Image (cartoon, rainbow, N blue to C red):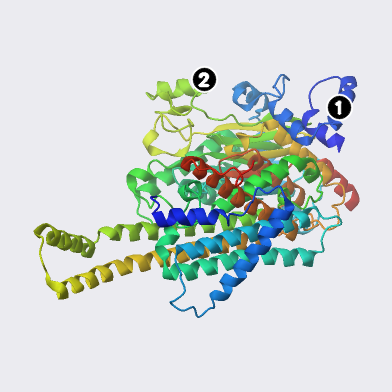
């Protein structure tokens, strides 16, 4: 994706914002988090529900939102890890509270995303806030819902292999290796339904992409090309009419994208919630840890690859 | 715990003295290593043949086609007498009158999951007491191309087999009966393909496509005296007898020497394209369906009839989603451990302490089938995984019998 000079400067600016996810110094992180929370709160207060047009709803501001959200996700990851390894184990209701908080955080993400998408859906399909690596694995502007099941199976594999002996004796290990018969059945069912819905949305997207070459588009592109070829002076009034026509032809294309994106994001969120609801609180914590770890590290690795490609790796930004 | 580890690996014919020292060593090993060992353990032992190496000789030794009917007749008579008891038995704990129980209610567990595949093409069918005789039917079907042939097998094959059994009645000859049943199943798939029934599967019934759809079928009919396994394709039935895994079916892979000869004799070729495949297409040499590969790919099953013995522990039927990553020995080891572990009271807080689940399956067998499925997934099986575990132990019935008396 070609970056405009504007996006370049945006990247530079964002380097100061880039959360030091591979942090070594706790103080740096705490300071950073404090700053970003302040920043976040300021931003959020700028976005009341009845947002007005003078607020800049473009990809850049979502970029900022995303960076803040990542920092929070990292915080949540720490809390989840602490909850997992706490001795004695957290009370069930405290685990529930933590899980609810993390799931609500995802919910918040999709709510904001949908709000930004209403103003600028196109930036959601070519997001500047993620790395090229992540972008290459996008499905309709986000992670592929069926991937979540592979995440569970992979995590399950690690924990199962490690604890097979306990599991055979019928001991509870309280992690993902411990999926019960009914959980496995529910999980399998949710997986099948998710893949079905994922296919439906993929189908919708395919149909919508094909409309780029529908009759109005082809006709309009021909008309405009003729005008350019003939170097026709069509007059100010006609020019205005033509502009309107282009706008009205493109409008449903963009609107369609927004609808499909909304369905895709909705499926993503429901898949996440669905999996968490099948799991016990302990298992849920393991799942959310795995999800956050994968997301944060993939983002980090992708950024690193991009940086290397640009050849302007800054020594302090990614101290390995 | 150590004993359990050894359940998987310590079943070799090594002398007892070295066995105890090995057991001690195993205590120190993380289970992951032990489990891996179990998989990679070479099949040096005479009885621990790898299934692919299983020759028909193995089956012949189990085969007994004489005197089937005499016994069945007796059973029928017995059955009528105990008919009233049957109902009670299915509601309460299984009980028995003798070692060859007539009204026995089978203990089984079933797990079937999509796993890492995007399409579910496996089907499982469990029909306890499916015929008038005290016979129990278990089947695993692994579809390819689409799911509809496997689904049809699940819905129809037990009915067809039942009809064949009823028809044979007086002179029931298992091999014939089962081959007849599979042939009729294959006919039904063919006639269904050519008709225009509405269906909601992936292939949307495009005729050329539909011909390229098929399914494996491994079916076990468990009678009071026998285990009849009919197999077509690369799903598998494994018996665990006295701690030893015995394959009751032999996978129909195109490179199995006798299968290769059969395919070639029929005018077909086996081409290596991502493994050996009939005409470079299908990675098995027998299947239900697959009309376009006939006569090279046939639907005739290989049937084995095995006399049940007191040392029989369990029977496992599974699709290659399990067998690709879990050896026969390991699978048997895991199931044995589950069945043994179940004798201890389940720890408080474990989900559902009942012995029988809502779908009529047995808790221990269910646990075993889930555990095998999870083991397959943990070992990165990339296919659908379907597992049926059947408890064949007689000691349990005897103990409950003495209790009842």
Looking at the image, residue A220 sits to the left or right of residue A176; the answer is left
The one of B161 and A89 positioned closer to us in this rendering = A89
Helix, strand or loop status at disc 1 = helix
Mark 1 sits on what residue? Answer: B25
The answer to which of marks 2 and 1 sits earlier in the sequence is: 1
Looking at the image, residue B156 sits to the left or right of residue B294; the answer is right
Quadrant holding the N terminus of chain B: top right
Which label lies toward us, 2 or 1? 1
Can you give x and y, in whole percent of width and height, for residue B359 in the image? 68, 57
The one of A256 and A42 positioned closer to us in this rendering = A42
Q: Residue at x 47, y 41 (%)?
A: A309
The one of A68 and B158 positioned closer to us in this rendering = A68
Q: Residue at x 72, y 33 (%)?
A: B330
Q: Can residue A84 be seen in this snapshot?
A: yes
Residue at mark 2 shares a chain with residue at mark 1: yes
Q: CA distance from mark 2 to mark 1?
A: 41 Å
Label count reads 2
For disc 1, the neighbor class at 10 Å (few under 14, some 14 to 19, many from 20) is few
**Mark number for residue B257?**
2
Q: Residue at x 69, y 59 (%)?
A: A31
Can you give x and y, in whole percent of width and height, for residue B237 in the image? 63, 36
**Mark number for residue A275?**
none
Chain bearing mark 1: B
Q: Can residue A76 be seen in this snapshot?
A: no
Chain bearing mark 2: B
For disc 2, the neighbor class at 10 Å (few under 14, some 14 to 19, many from 20) is few
Q: Are marks 2 and 1 in contact (CB under 8 Å)?
A: no
Helix, strand or loop status at disc 2 = helix
Can you give x and y, in whole percent of width and height, for residue B25 in the image? 86, 27
Q: Determine which quarter of the picture holds residue B322.
A: top right
Can you give x and y, in whole percent of width and height, for residue A92 in the image? 79, 64
Looking at the image, residue A131 sits to the left or right of residue A72; the answer is left
């Amino acid at each position: 994706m070609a970056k405009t000079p504007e996006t370049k400067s945006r990247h530079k600016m964002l380097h100061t914002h880039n959360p030091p996810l591979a942090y070594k110094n706790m103080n740096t992180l705490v300071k950073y988090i404090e700053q970003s929370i302040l920043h976040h709160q300021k931003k959020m207060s700028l976005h009341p529900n009845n947002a007005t047009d003078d607020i800049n709803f473009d990809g850049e501001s979502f970029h900022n939102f995303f960076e803040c959200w990542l920092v929070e996700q990292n915080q949540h990851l720490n809390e989840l890890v602490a909850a997992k390894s706490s001795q004695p184990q957290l009370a069930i209701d405290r685990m529930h509270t933590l899980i609810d908080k993390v799931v609500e955080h995802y919910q918040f993400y999709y709510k904001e995303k949908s709000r930004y998408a209403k103003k600028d859906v196109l930036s959601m399909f070519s997001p500047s806030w993620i790395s090229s690596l992540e972008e290459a694995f996008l499905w309709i502007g986000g992670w592929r819902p069926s991937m979540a099941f592979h995440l569970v199976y992979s995590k399950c594999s690690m924990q199962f292999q490690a604890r097979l002996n306990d599991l055979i004796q019928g001991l509870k290990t309280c992690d993902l290796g411990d999926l019960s018969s009914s959980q496995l059945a529910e999980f399998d069912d949710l997986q099948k339904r998710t893949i079905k819905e994922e296919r439906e949305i993929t189908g919708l997207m395919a149909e919508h992409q094909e409309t780029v070459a529908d009759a109005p588009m082809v006709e309009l592109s021909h008309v405009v090309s003729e005008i350019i070829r003939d170097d026709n002076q069509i007059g100010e009034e006609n020019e205005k009419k033509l502009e309107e026509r282009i706008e009205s032809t493109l409008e449903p294309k963009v609107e369609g994208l927004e609808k499909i994106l909304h369905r895709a994001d909705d499926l993503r969120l429901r898949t996440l919630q669905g999996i968490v609801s099948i799991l016990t609180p302990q298992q849920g914590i393991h799942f959310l840890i795995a999800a956050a770890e994968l997301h944060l590290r993939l983002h980090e690795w992708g950024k690193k690859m991009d940086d290397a490609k640009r050849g302007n790796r800054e020594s302090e930004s990614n101290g390995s | 715990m150590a004993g359990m580890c050894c359940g998987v690996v310590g079943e070799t014919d090594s002398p007892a003295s070295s066995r105890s020292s090995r057991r001690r060593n195993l205590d120190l090993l993380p289970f992951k290593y032990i489990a891996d060992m179990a998989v990679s353990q070479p099949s040096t032992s005479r009885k621990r043949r790898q299934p692919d190496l299983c020759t028909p000789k193995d089956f012949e030794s189990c085969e007994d086609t004489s005197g089937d009917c005499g016994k069945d007749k007796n059973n029928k008579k017995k059955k009528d007498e105990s008919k009233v008891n049957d109902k009670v038995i299915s509601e309460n704990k299984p009980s028995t009158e003798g070692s060859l129980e007539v009204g026995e209610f089978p203990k089984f567990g079933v797990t079937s999951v999509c796993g890492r595949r995007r399409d579910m093409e496996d089907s499982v069918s469990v029909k306890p007491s499916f015929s008038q005789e005290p016979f129990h039917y278990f089947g695993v079907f692994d579809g390819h191309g689409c799911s509809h042939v496997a689904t049809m097998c699940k819905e129809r094959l037990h009915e067809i087999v039942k009809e064949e059994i009823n028809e044979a009645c007086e002179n029931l000859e298992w091999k014939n009966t089962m081959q007849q049943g599979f042939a009729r199943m294959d006919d039904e798939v063919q006639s269904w393909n050519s008709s225009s029934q509405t269906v909601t599967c992936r292939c949307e019934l495009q005729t050329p496509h539909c011909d390229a759809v098929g399914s494996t079928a491994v079916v076990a009919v468990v009678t009071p005296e026998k285990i009849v396994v009919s197999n077509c394709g690369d799903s598998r039935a494994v018996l665990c007898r006295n701690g030893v895994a015995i394959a009751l079916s032999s996978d129909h892979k195109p490179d199995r020497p006798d299968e290769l000869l059969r395919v070639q004799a029929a005018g077909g070729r086996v081409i290596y394209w991502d493994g050996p495949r009939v005409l470079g297409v299908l990675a098995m040499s027998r299947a239900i369906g697959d009309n376009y590969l006939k006569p090279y790919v046939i639907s005739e099953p290989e049937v084995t009839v095995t006399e049940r013995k007191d040392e029989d522990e369990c029977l496992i039927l599974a699709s290659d989603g399990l067998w690709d990553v879990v050896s026969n020995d390991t699978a048997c080891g895991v199931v044995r451990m589950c069945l043994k572990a179940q004798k201890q009271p389940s720890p408080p807080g474990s989900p559902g302490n009942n012995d029988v689940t809502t779908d009529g399956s047995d808790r221990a067998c269910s646990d075993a089938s889930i555990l095998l499925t999870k083991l397959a997934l943990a070992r990165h099986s990339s296919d659908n995984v379907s597992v049926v575990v059947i408890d064949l132990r007689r000691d349990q019935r005897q103990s409950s019998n003495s209790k009842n008396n």
